[in-house]
Image: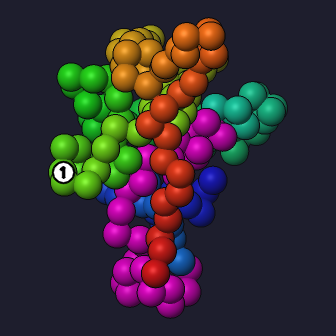
Amino acid sequence: FQLMYEHGRDPKTGLLYHGWDQSKQQHWANSATGDSSQFWARGMGWYMMALVDTIPNYPRNDPGRQKLIEQLRRLAPAIARVQDPKSGLWWEVLNQGGEKGNYLEASASCMFVYALVRGVRLGYLPSAYLNNARHGYAGILSYFVQTAPGGEVSLTGTVKSAGLGV
């Protein structure tokens, strides 16, 4: 957690880059920082879910616990700022909402709703983030949840694969 947060967090947006290469040698890595060029929603969604699921396993007096809580408290407003105001969802490339080729992504939206709700319920985040979570959840139900005639429910709009690529 600490390495990615220290090296992969953009100070302007507060978002985490999709990847960081310590050696700065990967073809996708910025030669000065080692960061990738994009803020991928699912990557950041996994990170935030892992945070809220990991923090409770730390003893209350462990200094690492407070560091993780502070990370969550800094990431939550960054995620709230890039939430699509109309749909309540999040874009596949977080900071490029509405750009050609970008789209609202179901699984990342589910991850952010989960992380925000759990963060509030565990007392790590202010209750105001429940508004973001509710708006996101309503968007998930409206845009992505489909029920087939036989009653089978499915979630659409989930990216099959994305990454740093060639």
Q: Position of residue 26 (x, y in %)?
A: 50, 86
- Residue 95 lies in the magenta-colored region: no
Tell me where residue 63 appears, x and y as whole percent: 70, 42
Q: Which residue is mark 1?
A: 99
Residue occupying the far bottom of the picture: 25
Majority secondary structure of magenta residues:
loop
Residue 128: quarter of image: top left
**Residue drawn at point x = 46 percent, y = 81 percent:** 166
How far from the left and from the top, in percent, is residue 78? 34, 39
Q: Quadrant of residue 40?
A: bottom left
Q: How many marks?
A: 1
79 displayed left or right of 149: left
Who is closer to the viewer here, 30 or 66? 30
Would you say 118 lies left or right of 104 here? right
* Residue 107 in view of the camera: yes
65 and 51: which one is in front?
A: 51
Asked if residue 95 lies left or right of residue 63, the reply is left
Please say which color scheme the image uses.
Answer: rainbow
Residue at the (45%, 87%) spot, across then down: 27
Left-right relation of 58 to 76: right
Three-letter amino acid code of the residue under disc 1: Glu
Q: Which residues are magenta?
A: 22-51
- Crowd tier of the residue under label 1, counting other residues whose Cα lies within 10 Å: few below 14, some 14–19, many 20 or above: few
Q: Is residue 15 visible?
A: no
Q: Is residue 94 above or below residue 52?
A: below
Give whichever of 69, 157 is nearer the camera.
Answer: 157
What residue appears at the point 48 percent right and 74 percent down from the top-left corner?
A: 165
Residue placed at 53% from the left, 27% from the top? 155
Circle 1: element type: loop
Indicate whether 125 appears above or below 165: above
